[in-house]
Structure formats: C-alpha cells, structure tokens
Image: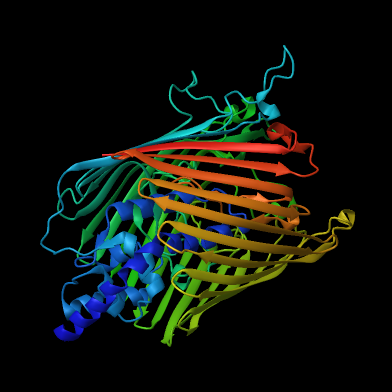
C-alpha cells in the first residue's frame, strides 16, 4: 500500500506546476457562471462580496486536510458530498496526507476540482499548533464617474441638487484576528450621492462591526457580538446569507448551512445586529440568537390617519431628502434558536424564529397583493434533513409561517459512477409564504405561490469533455408583478466545456427561457402572452504561460414576443501577471436592441468586487485593471472603464441621467495586511 501511495504521489507532484497555474482562473470562471445566472434572474441585493470575503479568508487561512472535519470541508461549495466523504475515507484508511497533490489519488477527485481546491487547503502535521499571533488587514476603496449626472447639479440659485452628497462612493473595511480564537472587524460605507459624515449621524452612512470568539469555553463553539448572518437548513425558514439557486454545479443544489457567521458585507438590510451563540456537544449543537436594529421604510396614512408601513426599503440609499426621511424609521426585533444533530450518515436541523417591527405593514388593495404579508409580526418553524447514502444524497426542508402558510423544498443528488452526477429538486410555496428572513431555491425573489421541478446533470463522456445541463419547470398560482393571472414557465441550459490542452480551454453555452407576461400592446384588455429568450455563448481561453492569459467571448441574445428584439456582445481579454504586478485589459463591442434582449457579462474588477452589468444599446467599452505590490504587505488596485455609445445623446434616466454619449468610471483600492 505504501509503495503504491508513494508512486502515485510522485506522479502527482510531477504535474503540480500546471495545476497551480490554472487554479485561480478556473475557480473564478465557475463563480462568474453562477453569479451571472443570479444577475439574469434579477435577484436583488445579492451579497456577492460575502462569497468573495469567505473565499479570500479561506485562502489566507487554508484548511488543514489532515485534521479537517466534514463541516469544515463543506465550506468549499464546489465539493460534492461524495467527494468530501471520499477525502475523509482516504485519510482514515491511509493516514495523514504527505502533499496536497495526493488528492489525485482520492476516488472521484477530478483535476478540475483539485484546481479549485488548491488555494484553500494545506497539508500539515496534526500536532502542529496554530500560532497565537495577531494578524489582519485594512482595506479602503473609492469609486466614481468622470461625468456628472444631473442629480448632483443644482437647477438654479434657489433649487439645490437632488442628491445631498458627492458622487464618490467609498468603503473601508478592517479585520483583525488573534490566532484562531478571536476575530473582529468593521465596515464603513458611503454610497454615491450620500453624505459622508452628516450631522445627523457623525460617521459613515452605513457602519457595521462584529466581535467573534471561537471556542472561548467548553461547549461554546462560537459567540458573535455585533452584526452577523444566519443560514440554517436549506434556506426555506432562515437564510440571510448569500445563496445560489439555479446552477449546473450539482454540489450547489443541497445547501451547506454555516449557521451563525460574522457579517462583513455592505448590504444595509440583510443582516442581524445583536448576539448569537453556538453551543456544541459531540454531534449536537444549539444556536440561540437575538437581534435589534433600525431599518428603512416608507409610510402611508390610513383612513383614520394612523401611519402604516407602505414598504420596507432594502436599497440602502440615502441620497435625497425623501430617502433620508425613510432612513432607520422603524425598529426590527428578531429572536429565535436552532438545534441540529450531525452524524456521518445524516443531518437534522430544526428551529424557530420570531420577526417583528413596531409599525404594521399596510394591507394592499390591489388583487395581485391579496396574499402579500401585512401586519407587524411573523413567526416561522422549520425542519430540515440531509441523508447520505454513499452515492445518493437526500435532502430537504419544510417550514411553516404563522401556522398558516408553508414552504417545501426536497431534493436528491445521485452519483452512479462513470463521471455522471444527476440531481432533482421539487419546491412549493403557498401563496402567502413570504418568510422575510428566508432565501430558498426559487425562480423569483417573491416566491409566494411558486412551485417547480428542477433537474440537472453533469457528465464527462471523454477525458477532456464536460457537459453540464439543467431544466426548470415552474408555475405561480397567483398574480405577480407584470402578470395579470397565474402563470408558468420553462427554462433549460446546456454547456459543453472542452479542455483542448493545459493551455487551451473552450466552451459553448445555450440557454432558453420561456415565461408569461402582460401584453404591452393590448394592456387595456389584460391580455397575457408568452415570450422566449435564447442566449448562445462561445468562449475560448489561451494561457501560454503563467504570465499571459487571453480570453475571447461572443454572445447572441434573441427575444421573441409581440415586439421582438435581439443583440450581440463580444469581448477580448488580455491578462499579464509578473511578480508584484498584474494588468488586465478588455475591449468590448456590443449592439443590443433594448432591455428585453440585454446581455449580462462579468467584468474584471478589484479584489472583493464583482461587476456584472447588463449590456444594452450599441457601442464599445474598454476596461483596464491594474494591481501592484509596491512594498511588503501593501497592494494597490486601479480600474478604469470607458463606454462610448453610438447614437445616444443621453445616458441613464432620472437623477442618474448624463448628457452625452460617453461614460467613464474609475475605482481605486488599497489593502494593507499585517
């Protein structure tokens, strides 16, 4: 056994250089694919930064494979349940690993997954203690546009600008750790148009901080004071963290809840503020939590002039006098607890949460809002499960809201062998199911009345060819925005990746979406019609060395209904890396008829930031990204993006309108690590 293991390890080490060269680009591509899907689904307020923050933190403090437990490996969302079990089984039967590249000897660990893993894992003796030292980083970012939107300009001497603050957006974030026992951090942010240090609140418009103790005493696994996020079960009851829905990555279909976690993003509504603990005794855990904070809302008066909440504001913008009036005007209280038991064959998760505000949300009179939540209190109970039967994983969750409405999500993932993985998931949410703190698998962010069946498959018919596909059939039992009656839809996606060689990669993707919407031609007749949108993408990447990488992409979109439209977009990337310097250049051409045929595409950005704009109209765009490490522990990023629209005399609308056909955006970021 030892001779065979040594032989395999030697071969793995021989090819390790080529694996390391591609790891960052491959992982980034997978994340981009999933985030573009979220953008195309118009999922608002997605915490892209939370995903990036977690991954960067893991890369800076990698998991030791020789002592990692299943719960730690589940943080790596691209690992399937079977792969995690195989890693643990390999370590159990063979003892401690000698090298990271020994993973290639683990059953079902393909080269692509190992490339994803490399930045986040390490191999060290179990008896090696974590050094109890202080380390951390502080980061600052500023961004704006060269052109000035009309919202920042005074109309005349007597009428001031609509936006109260400057057009610069800035953010500062700091984090400090003491070994693996203490973790603390803060975030300050000002959006474009907001005042930086206003008199009404002498700090940034948004301020956040946390203090986390890890294993401070026996039976307490974690204790967070300050801002935090929750993720339990499959997200049907409580999930304030970021989560993917539709994806060809089958490992994403069963969500891995992190329980309580520190909050480090700048989304001003999707967090809790207070304290949360996690008690742990062998396989059992118990997590009580409490939160109190003020949040934004708009008000209306009823027939007796009592003030009711019209809507809870989630944009976090406080740029105008009206937005400032709605800032932190209601009090939100949340409390609850979760308990779980984890066994290597199954997980059980159950809990209760109580959410309430001090003013009631008004009851809407429009028919489509008949089942929309009103009142000032919401309770939710949930029960989730996961069963691991080697090649088969069964998972799901059932939640009840106010003992009246319900949400159900159930799924299976099966790995029959031969590099094939298939998944199936069913969801159903009653018409009145809103569960304000939830984030379940769904087609729409307003999931009430939705039901559907999602299937996906991933197979490798040849050593260099990987095929991924999914289908989603869904329907809504009630009216919703821009649909006058109950509706249904269908979506399918297929992608074929071909690794031509270690330097060449290509893929082709096709996506088709069919939905029902209100007719824009016969709106007076309340007519509902069907539309179909098809996207096809061709992608090619060439990496001749560790220093150079070239990428080319072309995408076509066709939108069909009463008034059809189409569009295309193509870009060329050139990326150069050399020691302390890195530069990336993108040139984009696009010609897109309208909003319906818009195309989403990830753009190169600074660390921690993801930019996925919707391309529309006709024109060109040039993006230049630079980062340099001038001295030890200090890194500087710079980004400039210039768009030239053909035939436009104005860009944007409302307060964001810019006169002319050019838009230039800039961004500067500094990070110091200690």
Query: Residue 162 location, x and y as percent?
Result: 67, 25
Query: Residue 457 location, x and y as percent?
Result: 52, 79
- Name above or below for residue 443 compared with residue 93: above
- Name above or below for residue 4 compared with residue 127: below
Image quadrant of residue 432?
A: bottom right
Residue closest to the eye, 255 or 342? 255
Query: Residue 321 location, x and y as percent?
Result: 62, 25
Image quadrant of residue 391?
A: bottom left
- In the picture, the quarter occupied by the C terminus is top left
Single out the residue that lies furthest toward the top: 157
Whether residue 142 appears in this view of the structure is: yes
Q: For the point 64% across and 28% down, which residue is it? A: 322
Q: For the point 60% across and 47% down, which residue is it? A: 374
Query: Residue 547 location, x and y as percent?
Result: 42, 56
- Name above or below for residue 151 compared with residue 239: above
- Name above or below for residue 664 compared with residue 479: above
- In the picture, the quarter occupied by the N terminus is bottom left
Q: For the point 34% across and 83% down, which residue is it? A: 390
Residue closest to the eye, 242 or 624? 624
Residue closest to the eye, 501 or 267? 501
Q: For the point 63% across and 41% down, which residue is it? A: 642
Whether residue 343 appears in this view of the structure is: no
Residue closest to the eye, 397 or 575? 575
254 vs 285, left or right, is right
């Amino acid at each position: 056994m030892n001779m065979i293991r040594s032989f395999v390890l030697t071969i793995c080490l021989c090819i390790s250089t080529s694996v390391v060269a591609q790891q960052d680009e491959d992982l980034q591509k997978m994340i981009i694919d999933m985030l573009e899907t979220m953008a195309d689904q118009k999922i608002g307020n997605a915490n892209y930064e939370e995903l990036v923050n977690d991954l960067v933190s893991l890369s800076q403090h990698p998991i030791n494979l020789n002592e990692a437990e299943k719960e730690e490996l589940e943080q790596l969302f691209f690992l399937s349940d079977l792969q995690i079990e195989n890693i643990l089984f390999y370590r159990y039967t063979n003892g401690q690993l000698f090298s990271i590249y020994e993973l290639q000897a683990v059953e079902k660990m393909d080269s692509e997954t190992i490339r994803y893993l490399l930045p986040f894992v390490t191999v060290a003796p179990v008896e090696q203690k974590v050094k109890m030292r202080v380390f951390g980083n502080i980061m600052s970012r500023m961004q704006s546009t060269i052109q000035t939107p009309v919202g920042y300009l005074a109309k005349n001497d007597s009428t001031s600008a609509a936006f109260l603050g400057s057009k610069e957006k800035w953010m500062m974030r700091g984090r400090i750790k003491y070994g693996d026992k203490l973790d603390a951090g803060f975030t300050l942010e000002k959006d474009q148009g907001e005042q930086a240090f206003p008199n009404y609140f002498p700090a940034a418009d948004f301020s956040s901080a946390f203090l986390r103790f890890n294993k401070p005493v026996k039976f307490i696994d974690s204790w967070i004071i300050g801002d935090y996020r929750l993720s339990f079960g499959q997200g049907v009851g409580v999930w304030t963290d970021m989560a993917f829905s539709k994806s060809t990555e089958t490992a994403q279909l069963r969500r891995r809840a992190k329980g309580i976690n520190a909050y480090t993003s700048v989304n001003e509504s999707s967090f809790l503020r207070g304290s949360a603990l996690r008690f742990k005794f062998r396989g059992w855990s118990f997590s009580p939590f409490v939160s109190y904070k003020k949040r934004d809302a708009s008000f209306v008066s009823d027939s007796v002039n009592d003030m009711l909440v019209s809507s809870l504001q989630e944009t976090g913008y406080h740029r105008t006098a009206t937005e400032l009036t709605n800032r932190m005007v209601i009090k939100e209280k949340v409390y609850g607890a979760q308990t779980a038991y984890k066994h290597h064959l199954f997980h059980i998760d159950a809990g209760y949460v109580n959410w309430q505000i001090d003013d009631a949300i008004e009851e809407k009179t429009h028919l489509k809002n008949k089942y929309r939540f009103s009142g000032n209190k919401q309770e939710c109970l949930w029960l989730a499960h996961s069963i691991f039967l080697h090649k088969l994983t069964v998972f799901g969750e059932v939640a009840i809201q106010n003992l009246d409405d319900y949400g159900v999500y159930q799924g299976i993932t099966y790995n029959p062998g031969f590099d094939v993985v298939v998944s199936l998931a069913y969801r159903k949410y009653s018409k009145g199911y809103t569960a304000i703190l939830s984030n379940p698998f769904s087609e729409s962010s307003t999931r009430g009345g939705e039901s559907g069946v999602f299937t996906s498959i991933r197979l490798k018919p040849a050593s260099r060819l990987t095929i991924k596909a999914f289908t989603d059939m869904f329907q809504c039992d009630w009216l919703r925005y821009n649909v006058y009656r109950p509706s249904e839809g269908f979506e399918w996606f297929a992608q074929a990746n071909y690794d031509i060689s270690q330097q060449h990669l290509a893929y082709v993707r096709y996506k088709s979406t069919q939905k029902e919407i209100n007719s824009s031609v016969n709106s007076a007749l309340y007519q509902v019609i069907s539309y179909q949108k098809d996207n096809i993408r061709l992608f090619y990447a060439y990496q001749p060395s560790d220093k150079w990488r070239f990428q080319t992409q072309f995408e076509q979109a066709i939108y069909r209904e009463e008034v059809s439209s189409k569009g295309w977009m193509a870009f060329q990337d050139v990326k150069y890396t050399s020691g302390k310097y890195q530069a990336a250049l993108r040139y984009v051409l696009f010609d897109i008829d309208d909003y319906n045929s818009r195309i989403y595409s990830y753009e190169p950005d600074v660390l921690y930031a993801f930019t996925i704009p919707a391309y529309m109209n006709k024109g060109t765009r040039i993006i230049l990204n630079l980062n340099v490490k001038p001295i030890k522990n200090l890194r500087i990023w710079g980004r400039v993006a210039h768009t030239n629209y053909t035939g436009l005399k104005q860009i944007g609308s409302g307060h964001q309108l810019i006169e002319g056909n050019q838009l230039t955006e800039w961004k500067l970021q500094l990070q110091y690590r200690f």
